[in-house]
Amino acid sequence: MAAEGRGSHGHAQHHLDGGPPRVRRAARLGRPVTWASAAQATLHCLTGCAIGEILGMVIGTSLGLHDLATVALGVALAADTLSITVMETVDNAAMLAIPGAMEAGISSPVFWLLLAGALALAFVVTLPINRRLMSRGKGHAVVHAHAHS
């Protein structure tokens, strides 16, 4: 893992300590986090979620795994933070709850349309969570939303 300008601390360390010092300082000062910043950070998290989800679905389906095993594989590949865990929970619950979604298979446009809808729902649910975490100087989202500020 490459260092990110903080000695030997890398990306994973940011998850533990609430982000760079300037972000933690801004949170202590009560500086508000905009919905736009939260949306940008949530989109970043959603991208990671989607990559893990798609890899899990492709691998699980290709290996002929049961729906729950395929979902578990997708979660294992993507979930490393609270926001992504929420995203994974929401989008997988949606995929499992929609009749025929998992049975459609990865070669069906129906599957991809339903997955896109489930990921959009996950974004909407996770956006306020990320905004709250960011306003407290916490979470994965804060690192990426303020990395270049």
Image: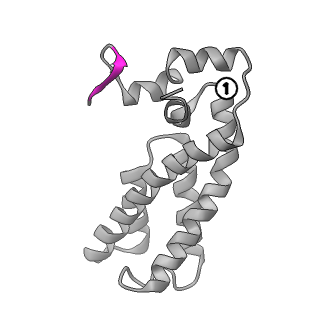
Q: Residue furthest front?
A: 149
Establish if 36 lies above or below 15.
Answer: below
Colouring method of the image:
one colour
Quadrant showing the C terminus: top right
- Residue 121 falls in image quadrant: bottom right
Q: Is residue 5 magenta?
A: yes
Q: Residue at x 68, y 29 (%)?
A: 135
Above or below residue 37? Residue 25 is above
Label 1 secondary element: loop
Q: Is residue 69 visible?
A: no
Q: Main secondary structure of the magenta part?
A: strand
Nearer the observer, 29 or 79: 29
Whether residue 44 can be seen here: yes
* Residue underneath mark 1: 136
Please, what is the three-letter code of the amino acid marked with disc 1? Arg
Whole-percent x, y for residue 122 in the image: 60, 59
Q: Which residue range is magenta in the image? A: 2-6
**Residue 140, image x, y percentages:** 51, 35
Q: Is residue 39 left or right of residue 52?
A: right
- Residue at 35% across, 84% down: 107
User: Tag count in the figure?
Assistant: 1
Q: Which residue lies at the image location 67% right of the left edge and 54% below the top edge?
A: 125
Residue 92: give x, y in percent of width and height: 52, 65
Residue 71 point in image, percent of width and height: 43, 65
Is 119 part of what is drawn in magenta? no
Residue occupying the point 55% across, 42% down: 41
**For residue 34, side relative to residue 76 (left or right):** right
Picture quarter with the N terminus: top left
Is 79 or 147 nearer to us in this picture?
147
